[in-house]
Image (tube, grey):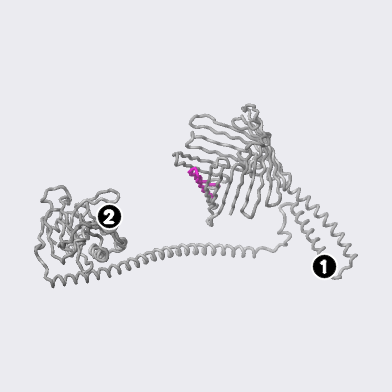
Amino acid sequence: MDPEIAEWLQRVLQTIGYQHRERMYADVEAVLRLFLNFLVPKAETYTHDNGRSQLLLSLIGTIPIVYQSATYNIPVALWLPTSYPSVAPIIFVTPTAQMLVKAGKYVDISGRCYHPYLAYWSNKSDSNLVEIISIMQGVFSQEPPVYAKSNVSAQPQQQSSPTLGGSYPSPTTSLKPAPPILTYSPRTSSSSAISPQSQQNRYPTPTFGSSSQQLTPQQAQLYTKLQTALLEFNTASSREMQNLVTVNKQLNDAETRTKSELQSLKDLNAKIQYNITTLTGSIEQLNTKIEQIRTWPEKPVDEIICGSSVVHNQLFELVAEEIAIEDTIYYLGKALTQDKVELNAYMKHLRNLSREQFMKKALIKKVKAQLGHIFSIVKMATSIPVPFSDLGKSANDLLGKDFPVGHTKLELKTVAPNGVTFNVLGSQDTKSGHVHGELKTKYVDFKNGLTVTESWTTGNLLTTQIELENKVAKGLKLDITGGFLPSEGKKNAKVGVHYKQLGFNSRAHLDLFKGPTFTGDVVVGREGFLVGGDFSYDVGGSYITRFAAAAGYTAPEYSVAVHAHNSFKVFSASYYHRINADLEAGAKAVWDSKAIPSADKSKAPVALEVGAKLYLDRDAFVKAKVNNAGVVGLGYTQALRKGVKVSVGGLVDTTKLDQAAHKVGISFVFDA
């Protein structure tokens, strides 16, 4: 390479800021040496697809090809990105004014060139300009990328090279005459300097040879043969290169999969080793326990298996005796069939045993009833009361749940192998057609007392709750709840404390973004009696926004509750009774002290509602309710199979039978 061109090239590479200048210089020098008088370097502005302009080094000119035994010069421009050779060069076919681009397999309509070698450029460390130019020669020899316009006359031209920055005339070399449809007329440009400086900043024009030099017929024939052989070699190399690139990609993919499988096997091996260690430790503990048990003195079974009280021991003995009588009667029957016992003796013993068995069964029933009563009293005296919001819950559930009216509902519950619970809920309002959906996930770490719950609704409300229970203190639960509504930019955050012990249950929450507002409630209980209160306090405004109180009594078969809501403006009383194992009944009355009397019974100051629930069998039940406004509600729930439940319901306004005031609905629940 001419020293002055080399000095200019070094200066351009440093000014533009190429990352690998030595590699860049070596590749450009190799191209200029191989394609002497065909390609020349320039520094010009390149506009990317995103509209960003950048000063880059380019190689402008032509590359020779042999097409149908004739030599043609294809006009091209190679742009070299600043991160070359990490990034492939950008190659364009640049037709002259008398040419048009012919889109094909490797060239699009804009002249941009594509090839697998370019696509997998970064996969090979030895990718270089000389190879890609040789590959493009072979590609263009098979399918020329340009063609002449219809008004161009057939005039052979000699190959020429474009000027370098417009600073020196281009040398030419005589080649075999080529048809004009692929000839390239170079265009001079005075805007290729790397900066707006005077003419002396551009490198001077070197002289490469005389433009009047001609080839002899023997030289031209030899040149043509060499060109043909070179193009055939490049074509074969291109095919081999494509095959190698494909194989390389397959090997890389296989290596990635192998590494992934190897990592999976390592993780599995680590888990297995951990399980082996855990199992070994458990076996050692079991062996130690077994050895300890073997050293214990032997005791009679009757002394080991006993009840927790005298009454329980009595029940245990009665049951054992009743079962022994049953076995005796069975074997007496077998002896009679085998003629080992006479009929008179059999009947005599059977009457005595049956009489004794009846007395023991009656005594067993009496003891069970007494134990059940004692257990209920002990449980009520030592249990944790329900939260304030659950006072009267039995009656509220009886009158409110399992009546899917006014909407169609679908609920799906599943549990992943890692313990994560998914709950998908969707409902459609039968009147407005509005659809509401919610996806909720819940993960519980029982060992650490941690619970994480996340939900996402069709209203694009995102909610996350984190709970920590029984870690700081027994009976204490801490929780943080956050919500975000992106469409409106609304967000909220709450921190809460829940503490419960025998006879005591309290909760407190602080809404950080609303007020902030402090909400708290407390319930105390003793022997079934419950008393509680609830309030809300605006910290910013320093005033109580609402308060409520409630009292109730809970027994095994029934419960009652009285509430004073809405700052003692609304009062309610509820009653629930479990009559037997198959029948439940309840009632609720509400009085609004601020309500204005109206002819519409649904808006009356006093509202009364009664209802009942009847189990038809273990898989189905029906519910019915009626209120003082004349609205009758019916519901039917059927368990189709394990985990699949369907409920249908309806509300009928008996005062408006001829109007469209009635509601129906259906609900499906899939619990896996």
* Residue on which the image places disc 2: 110
User: Which amino acid type is marked by label 2?
Assistant: Ser
User: What is the crowding at mark 2: few (fewer than 14 residues within 10 Å), some, or many (at least 20)?
Assistant: few
| Left or right: 594 in relation to 577 | left
Res. 121 visible in picture: no
Out of 281 and 5, give the one closest to the viewer: 5
Residue 609: assigned label:
none
Res. 500 visible in picture: yes
**Residue at point 52%, 49% (across, down):** 441
User: Which amino acid type is marked by label 1?
Assistant: Lys
* Whole-percent x, y for residue 512 in the image: 48, 37
| Left or right: 131 in relation to 348 | left
Dot 1 lies on which element? Answer: helix
User: What is the crowding at mark 1: few (fewer than 14 residues within 10 Å), some, or many (at least 20)?
Assistant: few
Out of 297 and 189, give the one closest to the viewer: 189
* Quadrant position of the C terminus in the picture: bottom right
Q: Is residue 514 above or below residue 339?
A: above
Magenta highlight range: 449-469
Kindly give the residue lying farthest to the right in the view shown: 344
Dot 2 lies on which element? Answer: loop
